[in-house]
Image (cartoon, rainbow, N blue to C red):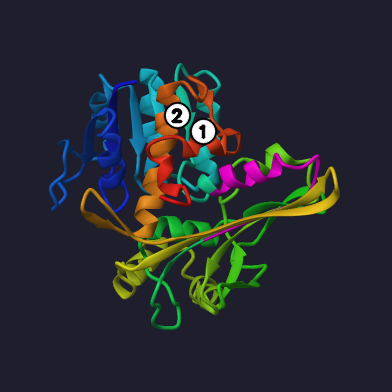
Amino acid sequence: MQNVLVIGLGKVGSLVATLLNKQFKVKGLDKRRPAKSLPFEIIEGDVNDADFIEKSLSGFDAVVSCMPYNLNLPIALAAYRLGIHYFDLTEDVPTTTAIRQMADTHRGVMAPQCGLAPGLIGIVGADLAKRFDKLRDIELRVGALPCYPNGLLGYSFTWSPAGVINEYINDAEVIHNGERKMVSSLDGIEVINIEGQEFEAFSTSGGLGTMCETYLGKVDTLNYKTIRYPGHAKLMRFLLYELILKNRREQVEEILTAAKPPVKEDVVYVYAVVEGWQTEGLAREEFYRAYHPRLIDGQHWRAISWTTAASIAAVVEMVAAGTLPQKGFIRQEDIPFEAFLATENGAFFRENN
């Protein structure tokens, strides 16, 4: 795998392409050229034009979509027709289901959900789960937050507003009492204390990817929740359900984007807990990290940008190196964490890096 096309050069996509450009021949594609200078060739065109996308993919070995969830399927379909590897960051369950169906007869890899959640958190959770002879509970939590929140929401849209709203509206899949079921997003609020700071966590859609299918019959409890500052879920429920704006997604996105622009200083919390039985009896294993903004090639990148970009870039590396399968659907929980950390981009997540 040598030639890679990255579609969508926004807050995350521009860094994905920059990181991959160090190892592959990369081109970027977006509807307009980004304001900042980027170290690779850029194709300008309508990302909503399926014919243009398919023509643009010709000659590439892989495509990485960094577009909002609702624009991924035409890109995946074009990759399927051309038989090239496909990667994306989607959290949307219907999109992933459609991509998975394509993967059954695809000549290359179909690897959606390669961001943080789903993505990194599933890799981490599965790594902890492997340490047990018998599992009881898997609880996964991720939050991308401003370091210095203001206002009642305590939030800033540092990545796709469409994706955030989609996670808040769609139901979340869980395993509860050993049964696979759906629960309402923005519900199941719990209090979390991280380094002396109180947060809330609540159910949101898509964060587990395919893990409920993988662990059904193996755990009593499996769930994913999003971490926010206290009071966030209550306000979002008011906005989406009491004001009945859930049916006006574009309007909600416009309101929130205008009210809560991105901040430079953010933090990404990744927290996983697994309980079960090991040789010595009932045990608990935990993983916790707080990731902050960092300099990459002399440029400041938000925590949400570099953690998401490095996650998907590491998976691309692993496919290129033959560490992962070369065709079919790749589940995030099947990606070995140590091999992930051993990649050039996975190395960003090492404790001493």
Quarter of the image for residue 132 reads top right
Q: Is residue 24 above or below residue 160?
A: above
136 within the magenta span: yes
The residues bearing labels 1 and 2 have C-alpha atoms spaced at a distance of 8 Å
Q: Residue at x 51, y 46 (%)?
A: 120
Q: Nearer the viewer, mark 1 or mark 2?
A: 1
Q: Is residue 161 left or right of residue 53?
A: right
Q: Is residue 207 visible?
A: yes
Query: Residue 301: where, in percent of width, then height?
Result: 29, 56
Which span is picked out in magenta? 121-142
Quarter of the image for residue 81 reads top left
Query: Residue 161: where, in percent of width, then height?
Result: 38, 60
Q: Amino acid at mark 2?
A: Met
Residue lying furthest bottom: 151
Residue on which disc 1 sits: 339
Looking at the rendered structure, which numbered label has been put on residue 89?
none
Q: Residue at x 43, y 55 (%)?
A: 163
Query: Residue 219: where, in percent of width, then height?
Result: 78, 46
- Identify the image quadrant of the N terminus: top left
336 within the magenta span: no
Q: Amino acid at mark 1?
A: Ala
SS at badge 2? helix
Number of marks: 2
Q: Evaluate if marks 1 and 2 touch, with contact meaning CB atoms under 8 Å apart.
A: yes
